[in-house]
Structures are given as C-alpha cells and as structure tokens.
Image (cartoon, grey):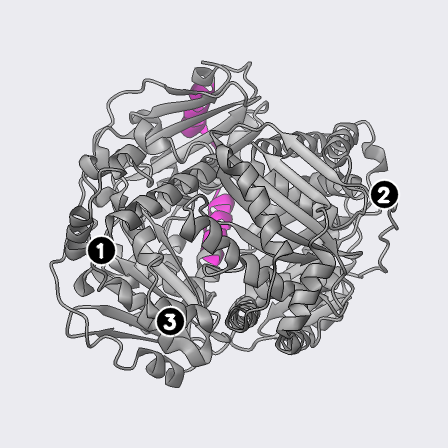
Amino acid sequence: MSVAERLVYAGTVDTASWRSTANGLRIVAHVDPATEVVSAALAVGVGSRSETSDWSGLAHLAEHIACGAETSRTEALAAVGGTCNAVTQPDLTLYFGSVTVPHGRTLIERLLEVISFEGATAARIRHEIGIVGDEISAAMNGSVMGGFPWLWLPSALYDEPEFAHNGYGDLQSLKRVSPTILAAFFGRYYVADNAVLAVTAPSLDELNQSLHKTTARLSRGECRAVGSAQPPVVESAAPVRLYAPEQPWQATAVAWSLPCASLDIEHLRAAVLADALVGPDDGVLEDALPDALEVAAYVGPFADPWDVAAPLPFVVEVHHESSADPLVVCDAVLDVLRTAEITDDTVTAVAGRLKTSLCQRLTDPIENPRLLASAEVVHGRIDALAAVPERLDTVSVTEVYVTACQLAERSHRILTRGPRL
Amino acid sequence: MIISIARPSASLAWLRLRSRLDAGRPTEVAAYGMIWAKLLPHLSVNGVPLHRELAMRGTLLATDADGHGLSVQLVANPDHLAKVIRTLRIAIQSPASNDQVQKAYQRCMFSWRSIQEDSESLADLIADIALHTTDLSRIIEELDKAILNLFSDFENLPKLAVTSVAHVGPRDETEELVNLTPQKNRFVALVNRSTRFCGRLKVVSDDSALLRLGWKVPRRGHPDFAALAIAARVIGGHYHSRLTRMFRTERGWSYSPWALLRAGPHHGLWQASIRVPVQHLPKAVQGVRQLLNDYVADDVEHATAVAHATAETYRLWSSGESAVSLLGYWQDLGIDPTNEKDRWLTALSAVTTDDTVNAVHKWLTNDPHIELILT
C-alpha cells in the first residue's frame, strides 16, 4: 500500500504527494477539499535533546529568534491575517501557520525563510531571553506545559543532560549565548536537508501556487542525524522530591524509560496499556487507588507523542491527599501492573479511541501538516505514522500484559511534589 | 435548536450537545456543570459506563462546564453515529448510583482545587462566569460555596436536558439528532446588580504576576460588537498588535499578552491579559489603560486586524472539531447558526476605523468591571 493510500485509509486527504527539492528539503503536500485556508508546517531536525549541557536552552532560544524575526515576509504575512507560531520539542523544532487561500505563497515563503536564517544581534538575544523567562514563568503556573510532572520529569528520570532537558533549559546558561554561538547553531541545523515542509490546501492548483518557486534559493548544509540516541540505563529507584508547601495535596509520579521511539510497536503497546490503566472502564488504577484524587498514565514527555526518538518515558501520575505516603502509592501502582485484569474488550476500546484520536489530528487541516512534518523529520518514514491505525489493531491483550509485567520488574523512578517531603 | 452541517469529504463526525442547567446563579450553574461533567461519562448504559460503551466504537467523549451549563463533545465514526446518539440518550436518562455520585464529587473537588492553583485557569473561569452575570463581586466565594454544598444538596441536582445540538460530518444527520429531543431553553434570569470585582489572590508562583482586565460590552448583534472585535485584534490579537509591541517587542517583559472579545447571553466581555514580572505590574496596568485611553485609528493596523479576524473565522470553520464548537457557541448565544459565518464576515468587513475608535472610547475607557491580579 502506498503512502497516499495509507493516508486515505486513515481518512486524511484525497491526495498526498512527495517532493524532494534539489537542496534536500523534503516536501509533503496534501489536498483537503474541506479546508478554507492554506496551512503549513516546517519541521527542523533539531530540538532540546540536540543541545550540549554548555548551551542548555539554545534550541528554544533559536526558535524564538527565528519565529519572531522582524522581516518583510513576517510583516507581509501578518498584513494578510496569516499566523505563524513555533514550538521546540525534544527532537525537532516546528514552525507552523495558516492563512486564507489566496495568500498561501506568503505563508510558505515565511516558513522557508526560517531555514535560511543566520543569526541575531547581542541586543536581540538579550531581549528574547527576557521573553523566554516570562514563558517559563507562565509554564510553571499553567497546568498544561508546567503541570506536574512534565517540567520536572526529565531531570528526575534521566542523568544524561540531553535526556534530562525540560525543553526550556537554563536561563543562566542562555545569558552567555553570543551572536557567534547562535550563528553557528543556525548554520549547523537550520539547513534545507535537515527540514521537512508539509502543506495542506483545498485543491492541487492552490498547492502548486503556494509552492511555486519557493525553494530555489535554499542552500545545502550539513545535516545532523536525529533519532539515533541510545536509551540510558536507569539504575536508581530513589524518590526525587519537590517541596511545594502551598499545594494542598500530594502528586506522585512513577516513571520508566522505554527503549523505543514513538511509532515503534513497543510504543503502541505501551500507549494501549497506559489508556487501559486509567480508562475507558474507570481504569484498574482507580479501583486499586480508591482514595486517589486523580490518576493519569501516558507515554512520552507529552501525551500522544508521535514525534519523539528513543527513549520514551512511561508515566503513571497519582494525585492524592498528603496523608498518603508516596512510596506506598508507588507500591500500589506496581501491584496493579503485576496483577491488573485487562480484557480483550478493553484493549479493543482503547485501540479504537487511540485510532480515532490520531485520525482526528490527521484529518484536521491545521494539525495535519504539523503531524506529518514532525513525524517525517524525526523518524524519516511518514508511512509509519499512516500505518498506526492498522498496527494498533494488531496489539493483543497478551502483549499488553507482557508490557505491564515488564514495567513492574524494571527499574523506575519516583517523583513526588507537595507538602509531604 | 439543532444544526447539522454536511461535509462530504469528512471521514469523522463531530457532535456537540449543550445542556443548560436550571440551577440559579451562574456560579451554581458552573458548580453543577462541573459535577455533571465528571458524572456523565460514568453513567451506565445497559450496565456499562457510557465512556466505555462509546470507546468500543472508537468514539471520543469530552465534557466541560461553564456558567452556561454542561457541554458534551464527541468525535465518532460517521457510520456509528446513530448508535452513539441512542447510547447517549440512554445514559442521560439513566439514574446515577450513590457510588458514581461520590466519585464524581471527588473528581469535581480535585478539579476545583487544581483550578484554584493555576492562575490562568482561575482567571479564565472568573471571566467565563462573568459572561453570564452582571454581579461579579463574589464569584470565587460563591463558586467555592456552591461546590462544597453540592454533595449535601445532590438530590436537587438539576436534571440533564439537551437544549441544543450541533453536528459536522459527511452527511446531514438532522433526523437522527432529533432523537436527542432538545428542549426549550430553560435558562433562568439572573440577579442584576452592577458591582466590580477586584481580586488579589495568592497562588503558587514565582516572581511574575498575571493581570486580567475586563469590560462588560454589548452582546453580539449590537452595532458596536464587530468594531470591538476589531479593536481587540488591533490591541492584542496577534504578534504585531499594540500590546505585543509594547510589552514583548519593545520592553521584553511578557511572552504572550492578548486582548479578546467574547460574547455571553446578556453582554460581551472585552478582556486584556498580560503576565509580567511583579516589579513591572504598576506600569503594565498603566500601559494597558493608556493604550485604550489614547486609542487612535491607523489604517494599516485596521486592515491587518480585519484580515486576522477573517482568517481566524475561516481557520475555525475548516476544522471539524472547531467548526462544531463554533456552531455550539452561536447556539449558546441564541443565534441561528445557519448563515452566521457569512454574516459575521460581512460585519467584520463593514467596520471602519472610525467605528473602532468610537467603540473603544465608548465602552473601554472607563474603569474595568474586572480587575484581577494573580501574583
């Protein structure tokens, strides 16, 4: 089955086609008749895991500077109501936006400008570091990015700097970034053959108009391989604790490192297990922890990760009253993994939900380019994403049991936050 | 009210239900909505919890509550939609056991505690309830009391009654949707006392403060509403807006300042929000007020704002998930959604720079009705 056929199977688009330009930029283009905008995403194969400990946070700072650059194309896009935003992930940096159909080319030109970006002045770097500081404050106070335990999990789970990275890095380290360091970073990573552009438009004509002659000026540069990192060994089960006396309850996370990348079959089995532990049948975890305020289980630094190279964290998160001992909570979680009764029906239901969730993102004209560009730049195989629905159907209850038992016997770490130290 | 939009190329179907809860003040409506949001997925359908029954068909279920009532959103395989609707109707009509209620209350309490710990969520909830009441003085205290009283008063929990249904999918499913038996709007009139809410709350934080200012403005449909929407874009609607230029581009104080206009059943709420380092808070308050008091027209900014508002409408309409939310939002306001997208685009394009200036000075230069500082 071709990539296009698989995408159609997943309910994605009417047409999916690949182009690889002379300078190495990969382009995936889609037609979606339901959309009334042109949307696009440019994924660059560099993320927080690419950094050295000397320059922690450089990938995120570079994203801010490239995305916020005041250029004629930025202004041209804004003037026609186009949006452009960006996000830094462990293994990629994603620039994305949308615009009304007649201005598709303006959006594409703005995105491609990113991979010919060369640097910024010292004053611009200082200015952007202040904004990054405010973003971190907002994340620390928000429940999505800063919600327990995402910001703290990497450093609790991994010793190696590249895996222990929380995505934001170290502000003090960033203050030493010079224009030369930044220019070297852009020169090394922000090159055409380390990037993927995905575009969705209502018709083939509009796609071709948007893409017309937009890649001719891009230069070829050095490409760094992504997704080849080896998983570290987690040896200690010592709890890592965070003191938050003003929080009225305790939150405890038990975390494992899975030696697989997202889209691997091991990831899909673990994703099914995570959903089976907490839903849809009220979840076996909730039954085992009747006093818990809330329980969650997921794979990855973010829920629903399709764009992360190995290793992937597997996390069980329990919010409970501070009268309960975090170590006792952890033991209860391990008991559930050893003894949980998960049925065929539950696995079917969970796989169905995961398939619908992925299909919804693949069919969303705004989400679609982001998902495809990200998966391609990290994994190098867009067809692996398109094949997820079929592969989820192959996950059996026996495999889910085996995954659970393996986790129960493997080393893990405990992260707890709240008034109880 | 039922609206069904056919998109032949869609491979999924999106369904949104709204149940207005006849519970009195919007704080009580929100509290009851919260517990229903936690309870509904666990109600039994032939002995099986609703969310499991739906999941067996790969259907995603999400519930949410606000000062307007409960909203339920589903994403389903279009071929299973009729069965999903029947399942949902059975669940809505089935009684809840004591154990289910107790668990729902526990989940509800935890949500409320989590919201209180998260400044953005708390500010959003206050603003959301403010859309449904003219009395803003004691929202937090009332909500706290309403939630604490829920359990002892659970026998009086308002029953769910679907009041509006919106659908986007490959086929027009209006006939199936009628089976959900929408009922007439039973939303009650609210006490009308005009007071300001000035809150200063302590949340877990570092050295930054969240400032949220809100002005009550006319409801959607009023001649000034589209002009106020354009003003929100000019002031804080995109990366080149005045708030962003002042606080992010020029001073480097704030990651994402914004301004936004939302509509409620009785009035609109025009909001400006900015997170800044605590030491800059007084200047941030002064800066926002100054932006409004000194508001003057600029043709380029105006054209950009209209383009952004237009593009956002097209963007929301393009996604099945956001399109069904948009339809539901219009239903909540009592607007016929049939041609509302086109009507709104026409209204946006008709706004002049003078309209915007006049609307800002008419509605936004007095003291705000909400002045919330979370430090």
Along the line of sight, the residue nearer the viewer: A148 or B250 = B250
Q: Which of marks 2 and 3 is in front?
A: 3
Chain of the residue that carries numbered disc 3 in the rendered image: A
Measured Cα–Cα span from mark 3 to mark 1 = 21 Å
Do the residues at pointers 2 and 3 share their chain? no
Residue A68 location, x and y as percent? 36, 57
Q: Name the residue under label 1.
A: A119
Q: What is the x, y in percent for residue B293?
A: 64, 55
Write the residue at 38% across / 62% down: A96
Q: Which residue is drawn at 27% across and 20% down?
A: A236
**Amino acid of disc 3:** Leu
Q: Name the residue under label 3.
A: A107
- What quarter of the picture does the C terminus of chain B occupy? top right
Decide which of A56, B327 is in the foreground and name it: A56
Which residue is the extreme one toward the front?
Answer: B294
The extreme left residue here reads: A222
Q: Is residue A321 magenta?
A: no
- Image point 63% across, 61% down: which residue? B325
What's drawn in magenta, residue-wise? A329-356
- Main SS, magenta residues: helix
Dot 3 lies on which element? helix
In this rendering, would A409 be left or right of B20?
left
How crowded is the residue under tag 1: few (<14 C-alpha within 10 Å), some, or many (20+)? many
Q: Mark 2 points at which residue?
A: B24
Question: Which residue type carries mark 2?
Answer: Gly
Give the number of the mark in front: 1 or 2: 1
Q: Is residue A342 magenta?
A: yes
Would residue B37 be visible to someone looking at this image? no
Q: Is residue B303 above or below residue A297?
A: below
Does B192 sit left or right of A243 as displayed?
A: right
